[in-house]
Every structure is written in C-alpha cells, then in structure tokens.
Amino acid sequence: MMNKLLTELRRRNIFRVAGVYAVVGWVLAQAASVLETSIGLPLWFDGFVVATLLIGFPIAMLLAWAFELTPEGVKRSEAVAEGESVSAKPARTLDVVIVAGLVLVAALVIWQGTRGPILRQAQDEGSREANLLPHPELVEGSERATNNVNTDAASIAVLPFVDLSPEGDQEYFSDGMAEEILNVLVRVDSLKVASRTSSFGFKGQEVLGIPLIAQKLNVRHVLEGSVRKSGNMIRITAQLIDAQTDQHLWSQTFDRTLTTENIFAIQDEIANEIVKQLGIKIGGVSPETSKVRVAAGTENLDAYELFLRAHNKFIARNDIPGTITLFERAVAADPGFARAWAGLAAVYSVAPSWGVVDRDYNALAEKSAKQAIVLNPDLALPYAVLGNLEGDTFPINLTLGFAQLNEAIIRDPKETTAWLWRGLLNGAVGYFDKAEQDFTQCLAIDPAYENCRRHMAKVKLYTGETKRALELFEQGLMNGAGAQNEVFLPVYAAMGDFSTVLSSLYYRIMSGGSGADAPLIALNYRALTEPDFDFEKERAIIEAAYERAYGKPLDWTSSNNRDLAFQYRNYAAIKNPDTYTGYWWIPFPAALKTSPHQKRWMIELGLPDYWRKNGFPPQCKPVGENDFVCD
C-alpha cells in the first residue's frame, strides 16, 4: 500500500514540485527581506511574503496531484497515460537541479545561522555614516586578533546599534537603545562591561571585525544590533557574539508597535537573555530566576524620544543650546520624568563653561537637579550636579560640594561624571593624592574618558611630575581631547619648545577665524615666551587688537575671559576664579610664584578656612592663626 502511494506521488511529480517550491520560495523570502530594507518597504512586508508562501505550499501540492505536464500541455492526472508524462531524461535533469538547489539552500541557512545578518546589514545599509578611520586604540596595527580576546566569559561590550530606518535619521534612537541596555548590564556586579565611550568609539568600524574590536575593548563577548523605525512599527535586532570563536550565541528580532512599554520590554528581554547566556548570577540568584530591569522613568513616547535626542547631543557636546531645548521639551512632555530633569540639570550646569550665558544657568541647574531628586532620589547624576555647583559657584561651599558628590558616588559607583567632578574639587583644594585616586577610578570605569585623563595630567603637573603630565596631556591630544592650553602652553614655553607654542596658538586663533585675528598670534606668543612680559605696558596694544578682531571692547573681568587674562598675566582682573582650572596651583610662568594673586585666589576660594577644619595639604601649612604658606 505504502509503495503504491510513493509510486503514485513520484508519477505525479509531487516530490519534484515540493523541491522546486522550496528552492524558489526560499529565494523569494530572501529577496523580500533585502527589498524591505533597501527600498524602505513596511516592516510587515517580508513576513507577508513568507506567510503567502506557506499558505501556497499545500495549494501547489494539490495542483501537482490533480494536474500533470505533458507534451500537449497540462492535463488532469487521471487522463494522462503513462507514456504521455514528462520524459524520464528531463525529469532526471530536474531532479539533479532540485537536489543541488536544496543543498545550496541548506548550506546558506547553516552559514547564516553561524554568522548572522547584522554586520552585513550594517555594512550595506548602515554605510550612510561609515567612518573607516582607525580607532585611536588601533594605531599600532589592524591585524585580526582571534587569539588574543579576553577569556573572561563574564565580559561584554555593547556596540552602538545600527540605524536601518528608511530616512537614516534615527541614530539617536539606535544609540539610545544600545546605551540603555549597556546601563542595565553595567549594574550586574559579576559582569565586566566596556564603557560607553570605549564601545561607541568603534561606531561605523564594523569592518574591523568582532574579534579585533573585542580585543581592543578587552572583552570576550560583543552585543551588536540594529534598529528600524517605520511609521508606528519598530524592529530591533540583537545578536550576542563570542569573540573568541567569532560565533553567535544568541540572536533575535523583535517586531513591535512603537510604544515605550514595548521598547523597555525589549531592552529588558535582551539584557536578561545576555545574563542567561553568560550564566551570570545576580545577587546569588541563578540566571533562570534573576532579572535585571531597565529604569524606564516615563510612559510618554514623545518625552522618551526627546530625552534620547538630547542625551545624544549632550554626549557629543556639539550644540549646548539645542541640547537644552530638547531636554526642556522632554520635561514639558512629561514633568514626572526624573532622568530628563537630571539631564537638563547637567546641561544647565555646563552651559556657562561653553560660553552660553544668556540665563542664570547655575540657578536653573540647581532647581532641575532638586526636582530630579524629588522624583527619584536614587539617581546619582543630580547629586553630582549639585556637588559641582557648590564647588564652583561663589560663595563656594566646599563642605557641601564634597558631601553631594559623595552621595552621587554612593548611589552609583560607576557614575564617571561624579568621579571627575570630585577629582576636580580635590585638585582645586590641593588634595592631589585624592584627586589622582578619583581620576584613576574614573579611567578604570571608562578608559576612554579623556576629560579625566587631561585633569590627571594637570594634577601630575601640580605635583612636579612634569614629564608624566605632558605624556598624559599629549595622549589626550592624540585622542582628540584638547583644551587646558592655559595650563600647558606655559610649560612648553618654559621648556623652550617655542614651536609647539606657536603652532598651537596658530591653530587655536586661526581655525574658524579671519585674517583680522592674525595679530593676536604674535601677542599671545610674546606673552607666553617672554619671561619679562609686561602686561600694563602692552595693554593698549592688546585691547586694540582684540577690538579690531572681534568688533567689541575686551572685557577682562568676564568669566569667559579668565584664561585670556591669565595668559596675558593680567592676574588682577581674575576675581573669584572657578575650581576647574586651579590657577593658584599652576607652576608656570615662574613669575607667578612671586605674585600676590596666587594667595589671593586661595583666600577668595575659602581654602584656608576649609584646611583648618579638614587638614592642610602636604604642600601648605598654617602660619599663626590667620595666615598660611604653600610651597
């Protein structure tokens, strides 16, 4: 009975039709997936094609059973004599083609399963922003590094997700998805997670390969992914890769309606799947029963998207006014969104240092930080903002500043901004050993946080380790972190390295400027390199040159011109200096040591009173009840 059935199935070409259908159907499904991404078809398009193919399969089998191809055309199977069917030779040829096609399909499926589609999509579709210049950490070579990957299984880097949206305008959203997952994983004590700064430094450099990227980030595993928004739908694809073998451990695609609930649910699922795959215990609980959670903070999708856009701009520091506007819109959309208030407080607090002074941003930062704490007292960033404000706004309250920064670190020991700002405050007070410890911890958490490196360089300079200070400063320059010229250019001048001074001044003054700026180069150069430079004698010339270059009189007392006043040795104009630079500890030019202004700045900052309550730093000591001296 079974043999007769098989014979009849073969005669009616059921197996051949099934094989052809499988090969052609697979090709059509792959084409649908490629077309959906490349020409911006709706997210449901490839699923619709696959569903149609599945529904069509039994219909094709019924048609193959009922009809047969003959030299005269298609006839019902019952009306076809055995000799009228398709000849044996073409049939055998078709069999060979079908078998070859099925083998090829199987091989491609297996290959896709072992490698995954994400990197290919990133290279083909995400090339809108491809930047193939070497990462700073790759200057020593670009050889593949499959044998030098960190063998610690509990280590991972989260690469920025690729934006595959039709318009290519959702990078802030794809970056945000990756960062939210990273922020969840970083709270798992037993898991080593590469910092955001380090991981995101490889954006657009997927061509380097996962093993090499993992080696440079010193991790065993890498999470990569993509995000595609289309209308009210979102597709998030994630893949976990073992960099030691370059094989995927887990991958999944999530198609959801675009809501905050769905977004956070996907982030939760990805984070927990990673924990499960790596076999990590959370709080002594097995991965099967433990859970890590994304700190959502809002159910308002508009507020969340505004927050992600603002946060992305804040990290880049490329548009402070625009960042402020986005954060303000986010808290307006959801006044209960604590993380948005914290972000707003942070950008308010740095606005003056970026030349944005149209409002009282210190007062706004304090108000926003306190609002964030009311909404969520567990957040670390608002306390860090308050601590930085206390240590940098006159009248200075150093005691409260340190207390707030300590609170931030207690709430989140991995909040690098808190370590940075506490290091700055310790350095300003003269506690250089504590400042170095803070910056060291900051760099341990995030080795690519150049702000911590350059302030570490400053501390090394203040403690007399000039060679090491310049090494750190120059390392920062190679990684794209400038600033601190007012501290380090006098060092190069004192060493007789006038070429470095001149080239630095030329770039700083002429980049983005005009020919009217050119006379300022010589004036700045003379102020830095001439030991006996007399500001009062040159004052009229300097002020005339600046007014001609910028079309307005030079206001020496403006906080934005403190560095300029310091460079021209107009020390008397600097009142109530901020803790960021620490003019009172700068060792060069040598003439500053005999100036009465160093001591004046310390007194204005309130350092002697603080030292008497909390201890003098090693380089200073009290003299009587009301005086002091620093070496």
Image: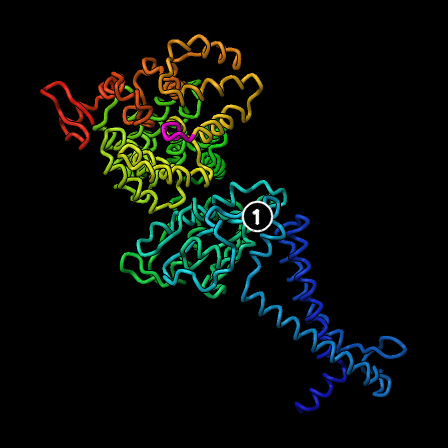
Q: Which amino acid type is shown beneath numbered disc 1?
A: Leu
Residue in front for this viewpoint, 131 or 348: 131
Q: Is there any visible trace of residue 192 in the rendered image?
A: yes
Residue in front for this viewpoint, 471 or 206: 471
Residue occupying the far left of the picture: 624
Q: Which residue is mark 1?
A: 132
Q: Is residue 231 above or below residue 345?
A: below
- In screen coordinates, is 515 left or right of 211? right
Q: Which residues are magenta?
A: 491-497
- In screen coordinates, is 47 left or right of 580? right
The residue depicted at 55 percent of the width and 61 percent of the height is 116
Image position, residue 204 (x, y; %): 55, 48
Image position, residue 62 (x, y; %): 73, 74
- In screen coordinates, is 155 left or right of 22? left
Residue in front for this viewpoint, 330 or 132: 132
Q: Quadrant of the N terminus?
A: bottom right
The residue depicted at 41 percent of the width and 63 percent of the height is 277
Q: Quadrant of the C terminus?
A: top left
Q: Is residue 62 above or below residue 519?
A: below
Q: Secondary structure at mark 1?
A: loop
- Quadrant in the picture for residue 297: top left
Q: Is there any visible trace of residue 376 in the rendered image?
A: no
Q: Is residue 561 above or below residue 272?
A: above
Image position, residue 559 (x, y; %): 38, 18
